[in-house]
Image (cartoon, rainbow, N blue to C red):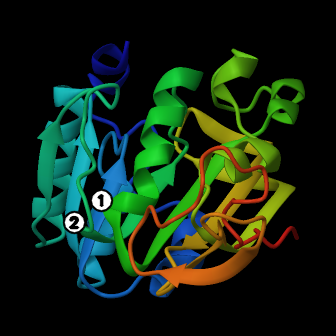
Amino acid sequence: MWNDRYNTPDYVYGESPNDFLARHYSRIPKGKVLCLAEGEGRNAVFLARQGYQVTAVDASDVGLNKAQRLAQKHGVTIHCVHADLAEYDLGSTQWDGIVAIFCHLPPAVRQRVHQQVPQALKRGGVFLLEAYTPRQLKFGTGGPGDITLLMDKRTLQDELQGLEFEHLKELERDVVEGTFHTGRAAVVQVVAVNPARRYQVSSHRGGAVHKVRYVESGGGDSDPNCRVCQPAIKPRDE
């Protein structure tokens, strides 16, 4: 499907970056950024032009070839990886930023990807996402027609546990991005941070006492049989 869609001289989603990314990219610390389902490269090239070291992952080699041409046009370098996100490993403590712009995946694949994000980000690293919500089906101005591929705030809170949400919002806005994303749209937006210190509520071994402590890496001493032990960081809901 995607090779067929991208197999045209035109950039079907345009050459300009996503508006939400363009407004919030500076929240990502300068360094290495991973762009998921990057397609023809408009967002990856934009980030490279801002001084980031960018890796673009997509299942379409046709799209990635166009991404490289766009990078050459703007005099920047991006690293492209031809891979299926159902199998791609995001790595561990590797990225200063991870970007997912209209990255709509089957639920099981999306959950697998999102669950890797906190571990893949460096401490202080930022995850930035914009996606269509189920309300987008009434607009029909872009995105998948399958409701299971769409996202909302609750879904993202559940799937991105371990991150602190600085911005989490559902809204309607005009999206003008090439042929396939044009018009009024219903979207969800995320800016979330992998905290410098992660806190947990942990059970006291041998007793019913629980205490809050920070853990510098995932895991910790929480008791899997305890209903109280859970991440203490709660997302801020806007």
Where residue 196 sits in the image (x, y, percent)? Answer: 47, 87
In the rendered image, is residue 16 in sight?
no
Q: Which mark is residue 173?
A: none
Identity of the residue furthest to the front in this view: 206
Q: Residue at x 30, y 59 (%)?
A: 34
Q: Residues within 10 Å of mark 1 (few under 14, many from 20)?
A: many
Front-most of 134 and 195? 195
Q: Position of residue 173 (x, y in %)?
A: 81, 56
Q: Is residue 59 left or right of residue 223?
A: left
Label annotation for residue 34: 1
- What kind of element bears circle 2? strand
Seen in the picture, residue 164 relative to 7 is either above or below; the reply is: below
Residue at left offset 82%, top offset 25%:
137
* Position of the N terminus by quadrant: top left
Q: Is residue 207 above or below residue 61?
A: below
Which label number is shown at residue 54?
Answer: 2
Q: Does the residue at mark 2 contact the one at mark 1 (Cβ under 8 Å)? A: yes
